[in-house]
Structure formats: C-alpha cells, structure tokens
C-alpha cells in the first residue's frame, strides 16, 4: 500500500505533528469525501505501508523529525512556483523560507526523494510567458543541485474554483503557447541536469524530451526502497494520470496555503472552520468521531514482491 499525504491538503506544512502522532499510534481515520459518516481505519504499520508520498509547498515544520520515518520509504512532491501572495495567499516567502527548505530537505534525504513541481502554470497580464520563463530559469539555478526532476502542468478550470480565480483575468494558453514555453523549459532544465515531465496533460511533447509524469511513481519507489512493487495504475484518477494506486489520508477544505487555483478547497470559510476543529492527537485530521459515524477497517496489504523476484534467488 502507498500512502498519499496528501493531494487534498498540505500535511507537512500544517499538520505534521498530527501525522507523526498517527505514525506513532500506527493508524489513521479518514472520512469518505462522498459519505461524511463513513470512516475508514487505515493501518500505518510498516508491514503494510510500502511507501509514502508527501505533497507540500513548505516542509520546514517536519524536516527535523524525518528521522522518525527511517523505517519507511518516502519522497516529496514539492511545489515551488513563481507566484506571489496575490495567488498563493499564505505560502511563506520563497526566497527566505521555501527555497532554503527545499535545499535543506534535499541535502538531508537526497535529491532523488525531492521532486520539484512547477504547477499549475497560468497566464494573465502579470504572469506572462516571459515572466514564467524568467522565474523558471531563476528557480532552476537555485534547485539544480537539489532535484532530479521537475513536473509541470497547466491550470485546469474546475467548477469549484471558478469563483476564486475569476478576478485573476486568466488567459487560457493556445496549443502553440504550450509548446513554446515547454520547449524553452526543456532547454533550461537540460542545462541544469533536470528532467521535465508533465502531470495529467494530453499534449505530446516527446520532441522536447518531455514525457508524462507518474507523480505516485512505482519506479521511483523501487529505486529508493530497493524493492519491487506489484501495484496497478490508480483507477480513481483521470485516464491521463499515470499514478499508481494509493490511499490518500488528507481531507478537502483543510489546506491553509490559500492558493486561489486549488481544486481541494471549495471555500475559505470552510477551511477556517475545519482548521479550528483540528486536534493533533485525534485519529481524524479534523473534528471528532460522533455516534452517527461508522468506522470500518480498510483491508490493505503490502505490494512488495517477494525477495525471489528482486534478487533472483529462493
């Protein structure tokens, strides 16, 4: 089993104490997003957890405690964009906090375990193609010694984010603009020894040496963990998503980064309300178990293949 922590919220930045408490107790409760009173109890034992993917814009709060995860295989999807607080309203200073955190994290755990994400790309009067190219170059200069790969995507227009992004005056890119900026990104990345791929984008950019990403990546886990996994593609994601199956332990409407483009937050009012209900010692990310809730253990297993397949011996 692979744990995703989390596409729905920034656990490293805001809920790392809760996460380490869950690791210590060996399980987590996760509410069904489609059925509030249905709760899954998910084991976090090393006997069934084959790996963890962290998704974050600022892992600084958990870096000093990563030694507590020595028995787990994990890596980070680290989003580091060029936007200011007009779009990423609560993300701390890139120069003072986020970039140093990226560099420190990579130095501590290895650059193969820190994937740089420059996504989503959006265009308006301020954030032009020239702007993105300039700052992608600047970020590549600072991150080239600390990552192997950069994953890029373009803004998807979700129904539940239309209200938040409406004031931004976003201009959808043409296919030609997508090819132009990605061709330039590829050149910059190659000069810095960084491989570029795209997340859930249908466009074919192979002529630039750009492939399609697998953000929850079987091959990366196998390389980091020195094992082989028997795991399928995630059927709950879009068909163009290359991720393998995982269990997400986050909750929608709990991320406090305040990114206007985020699909995981429908309402800042709800985020504030949920955040006030967070208890770092609770099995749930927010709130508590009520008498109307039904808790069921989720059946999970390790997907690591036997040593025979890995070493070719009985």
Image: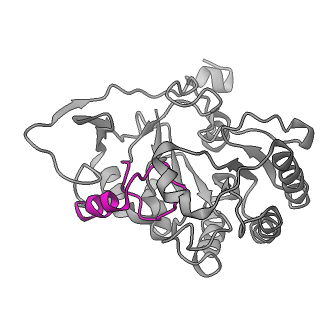
Q: Is residue 266 magenta?
A: yes
| 179, 247: nearer the viewer | 179
Residue 15 vs residue 104: left or right?
A: left
Image coordinates of residue 276 in percent, x first then y, are 24, 65
Residue farthest along the bottom direction in this orientation = 96
Placement of 306 over or under 187, stated as above or below: above
Residue farthest along the top direction in this orientation = 314
Residue 173 vs residue 255: left or right?
A: right
Residue 70 seen in this snapshot = no
Residue farthest along the left direction in this orientation = 291
Image coordinates of residue 248 in percent, x first then y, are 42, 40
What segment carries the magenta color? 251-277
| 103, 88: nearer the viewer | 88
Residue at image location 65% in from the left, 20% down from the top = 313
Placement of 178 over or under 50, stated as above or below: below
Placement of 239 over or under 174, stated as above or below: above
Image coordinates of residue 312 in percent, x first then y, are 68, 21
Image coordinates of residue 158 in percent, x first then y, are 53, 44
Q: Quadrant of residue 233?
A: top right
């Amino acid at each position: 089993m692979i744990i995703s922590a989390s596409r729905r919220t920034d656990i490293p930045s805001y809920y790392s104490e809760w996460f380490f408490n869950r690791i210590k107790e060996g399980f987590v409760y996760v509410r069904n997003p489609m059925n509030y009173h249905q709760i899954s109890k998910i084991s976090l034992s090393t006997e069934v957890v084959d790996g963890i993917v962290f998704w974050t814009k600022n892992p600084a709060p958990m870096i000093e405690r990563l030694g507590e995860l020595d028995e787990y295989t994990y890596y980070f999807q680290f989003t580091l964009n060029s936007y200011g607080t007009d779009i990423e309203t609560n993300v701390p200073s890139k120069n003072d906090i986020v970039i140093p955190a990226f560099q420190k994290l990579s130095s501590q755990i290895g650059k193969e375990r820190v994937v740089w994400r420059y996504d989503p790309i959006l265009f308006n009067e301020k954030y032009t193609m020239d702007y993105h190219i300039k700052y992608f170059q600047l970020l590549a200069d600072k991150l080239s010694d600390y990552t192997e790969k950069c994953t890029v995507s373009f803004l998807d227009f979700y129904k539940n984010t239309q209200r938040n992004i409406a004031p931004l005056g976003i201009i959808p890119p043409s296919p030609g603009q997508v090819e132009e900026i990605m061709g330039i990104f590829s050149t910059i990345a190659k000069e810095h020894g960084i491989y570029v791929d795209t997340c859930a984008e249908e466009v074919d950019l192979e002529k630039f040496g750009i492939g399609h990403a697998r953000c929850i990546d079987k091959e990366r886990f196998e390389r980091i963990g020195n094992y082989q996994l028997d795991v399928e593609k995630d059927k709950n994601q879009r068909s163009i998503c290359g991720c393998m199956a995982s269990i997400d332990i986050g909750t929608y409407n709990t991320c406090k980064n305040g990114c206007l483009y985020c699909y995981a937050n429908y309402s800042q009012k709800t985020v504030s309300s949920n955040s006030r209900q967070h208890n770092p010692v609770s099995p749930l990310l927010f709130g508590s178990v009520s008498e109307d809730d039904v808790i069921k253990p989720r059946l999970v297993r390790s997907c690591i293949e036997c040593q025979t397949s890995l070493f070719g011996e009985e």
